[in-house]
Each structure stands twice: as structure tokens, then as C-alpha cells.
Amino acid sequence: MKGGGGGGGGGMRSSSSDLGPLCLWPKLNKHNTHILLKFGVSFLLVGLAFRLLLSSSDPITFLPPSFSSSSSSSDAVVAVAVSTNPHPVPPVLESTTASSSFSSYSPPPPLPIIDDHDQDHANATAGGGGGGNTISSNATTPPANGTQATASSPPPPSSNVSAEQVGAAPKCDIFRGDWVPDGLGPVYTNKSCPEIEAHQNCMRNGRPDSGYLHWRWSPQDCELPRFDPRIFLDMMRDKSWAFIGDSISRNHVQSLLCILYQVEEAVEVYHDEAYRSKRWHFATHNFTLSVIWTPFLIEADVFEDSNGVSSSEIQLHLDKLDVLWMEQYKSFDYAVIAGGKWFLKTAIYHENGTVLGCHYCPGRNLTELGFDYAYRKALRLIFNFVTESQHRAMVIFRTITPDHFENGQWFSGGTCNRTVPFKEGEIEMNDVDRIMRNIELEEFDRGRGTGSKNGVVLKLLDTTRLALLRPDGHPGPYRQFQPSAKDKNTPVQNDCLHWCLPGPIDSWNDLMMQMLAAA
């Protein structure tokens, strides 16, 4: 074809067959032409409008507004379930990525320990412990004396532990989040629960503030339902549950007891001579709850008096489990195992009947192996036992609990006077806790691999980060009754490791409930 396609007599030449009905146009009269013109224009306008309507409309979707229509079918099912269920059960990440600042390095001197019964103090501190947590300059509230705690050394380089190693990342990590204000407060008080020990009964001992009771743990990407004692007891009918570890485990079992006590009173059916290990029975549900005090979880010879004063070094047998819990293990349907802080004490290490070395034993002609060596050996022995056992209990391993001593340690005037939680990014773990938690994550991951092959359920209760954010939840000076009643100038020892009851530790039960629901 040639020509410009414009007006005039030139231009394109087409046969009538190309133009169709329009070739009849000159033969129509004026009136009919006018009517046909109106009809044609109207037809074109309607067609154009209909085409525009179709092209601009979105495809029909039944997904809630917060979900894209490009989601997969499986996502759509989850979306509907979340939007319609008033009490959703979010997917659970049983383990989290280790902090990026973990690494192997020479550890600082050991941190001391305060126990609520026997003053679990380190018998050798070698210069004052492992240093405090790193606190940001824009932390929510400074200590009562106005000074700021600082780190004794920068955080170490990143470790090799990743989310893929410790567990695949589902939609919600219940261990990542913030503490948010809670108008409801705790479900029990120091008056409604008779199981609170004196050292954790902060309100009775005279703590003047109560704001620390009005916070709840809120994961970043999902709602965490409150622990329901009725549902829990129904799940535990004809079952047995044990907390195995040190005084933090005893602190935790008392928190759980106080919540369950609002539904059914438990009867104490056993305690050891020192009242460290106990057992309770819930007759209506035939549920047995125990706490077994074994601070090392492995065989240990400890030479301490009731005040925690040592007459000799601890003798640790790295190839033998503590028979106190090992022989009872087959009777438990559920077991929460935890440890850590006691490994910071001076100790001599044994294996196969031979002394291998020690942790902080100056004056002894022994190899310094370090607490990290013993802790890794102990955890590997524990995980090997539970994953290779013919008994199929659900085992929950709880990670280390950081302390919050500021401006000193327990023996040098350290305090914990904060009254509100930290926000994420305002504080970092001290070096010792980093090393221990790194070991925990690595050994847990190794043990879970073996357990999955043998049909053993192994879960991680990763409370370290959320506990780190609660410097306000410890007894502090109120581990004693009215500590300043007689003389306000008398130095008072603070407990910045254990938790007030009620207090932040109650949220650990919310997390356990979610883990049970997910399992």
C-alpha cells in the first residue's frame, strides 16, 4: 500500500469487500442516515465502556485484605484460619538463631551464683566475674543510683550457628518479640499461692513498686495466648512432668504451680532433706509434677556448706550423668532440662577415672580446660542419653538465664534497681552467657538430629533473649524480708538472677503451652 492515508482524492484504494456495510452509506437518505449515525455512536460508546470496565476490574478473591491474591493455596488456608480463629495457635520455631556475636575465645573469670536456698555463690571469682551485660546509652530507665553499666569487652565475632542449623524458620518465632504493657496483670498473687518461697516473694518482702507485674511477652509476628491451666491439666491427665536442673528450674516449677493452683490444689507427696527436690500430685487429673535439683546434671562431688562456702574444689565427672534424675527419667512423660551457671565454679574435671584438667584452679598443676569444655561435654552426654533412650518422653531443653547485676557483682555491691523492661537493642548478653548459649544451640541441634531418627521429641525453650530484657523482674534486695527496716545504710545483698513471683518467669509457661499445642 502507498499514500499517506490522509484526506483528498488520493490515498489508499480499497475494494468494497474491505469496507463491508459502510459501502452503502451514500445510498441512504438523510433521515435514516441520522438515525443510523446515532445508533452507531451509541454502540461504540457502550462497547468502549464495557471494555474499560473489564480491563480495570481486579480478579475476584476470597482472601482477607491483609493477604495478597498472589499467595499460594497453602498460604490462603493459613490466612483464613488466622482470620477466623479467635485464639489462633501460631506455628512455633522451637529454636532460634544464635547471636551474631558468638565465637570461641578465652573466657573471662566466672560469674558468681546466688541460690534461693543455699547461696549458690562461686567459690572462686578471680577478679569479679564475667563482666556485665552491655547496656545501650538510650536504655529505657537508668539504674537507681544514676550510673550506667558498661561492658568489660566488646562482643566477640559471629558464630557459625544459623537458623537453618537450629531449626527451619516457620512463620512465627515465639522467642523474638518485646515486652508490652498488660493491664490484666498476673493470674495469681503472693496471697493466693502458697508455693512461693520466701526469697522470691518480693511483694511480701516489701518491694514497693508493682509495675513489673504488668508486662506480657508479645512475639513479633503472632499472638501468644495466655497459659490456660484448665487446658493444661486436661492435657496432663494421667501424665508425669519433671523440671530437672538448678534453682532456676525450681523457680520455674513454682511459677507453674501457682498458676495451676487457681484450678486445682496440688498435694506435696515428696521432698528431699534440703527441700530442693520435690514432687506434687494433682489428684483430680492424676497428674504428677516434680522438680529434681541437679545443678550440673552430671555426677558431681560438691563440698559446700549451707551458706555456699566451699572447703574444696568441685569434682566433676564428665562421663557420668547424675543418677538422681537418670534413674527417674523413664517415669516422666515430659521433662524440662536446664543448667549452666554452676559450670562457672572452680572444678576439677574427671573422665574414665582420670583427672583431665580443671576450670580456674590456680596453684594446681592441672591443664586449664575452661567451663566451656565441661559444659559442652555435659550437654552432649545428656542429649545422647535422652535421644538414644528407649523411653519416648517429650524433652524440652531451656536455654541459659542471664543475670542483671549492675555496678558490681553479688559480692561487690551489684544491684538491679531498674523498674521497666529493656527494649530490643538496648542490652546485649555478656561474653560468658554468649559462649554458653552458643554451646547450647550447637549441642541441641546435634541432639535433635539424632532424636528425629529415633522418634524422640526434642524441643528448645529459648528464654534467654526475653529474660535478658527483664532487669526489673528480680528480687534485688527484696530476697530478704524488709531489708532496710532496721538500718538503711547497712549493705544488702541483691539477687539479680532469680525471679520474683509473680513475675516475668510466668511468661515461660505461655511459651511452653504453645510448644505443646504445636507438638
Image: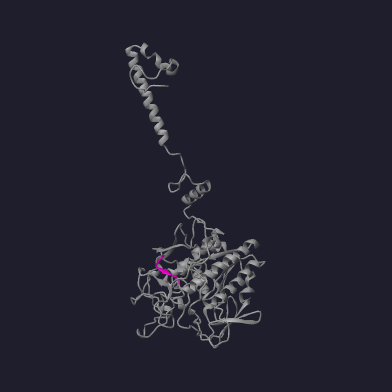
- Residue 428 magenta-highlighted: yes
Residue 279: name its quadrant: bottom right
Q: Where is residue 485 in the image (x, y as percent from the top left)?
A: 36, 83
Which residue is most to the right? 390
Q: Nearer the viewer, residue 48 or 121?
A: 48
Which residue is most to the front? 2
Q: Where is residue 204 in the image (x, y as percent from the top left)?
A: 41, 76
- Residue 29 magenta-highlighted: no
The chief SS type of the magenta part is: loop
Q: Position of residue 244 (x, y in %)?
A: 57, 72
Is residue 194 in view from this perspective? Answer: no
- Total count of labels: 0
Identify the image's colour scheme: rainbow, by chain, secondary structure or one colour.
Answer: one colour
Q: Nearer the viewer, residue 262 or 116?
A: 116
Is residue 135 in view from this perspective? Answer: yes
Q: Position of residue 126 (x, y in %)?
A: 48, 83
In the image, 248: left or right of 448?
left
Which quadrant is home to the N terminus?
Answer: top left
Q: Nearer the viewer, residue 266 or 177?
A: 177
- Which span is picked out in magenta? 424-429
In the image, 420: left or right of 358?
left
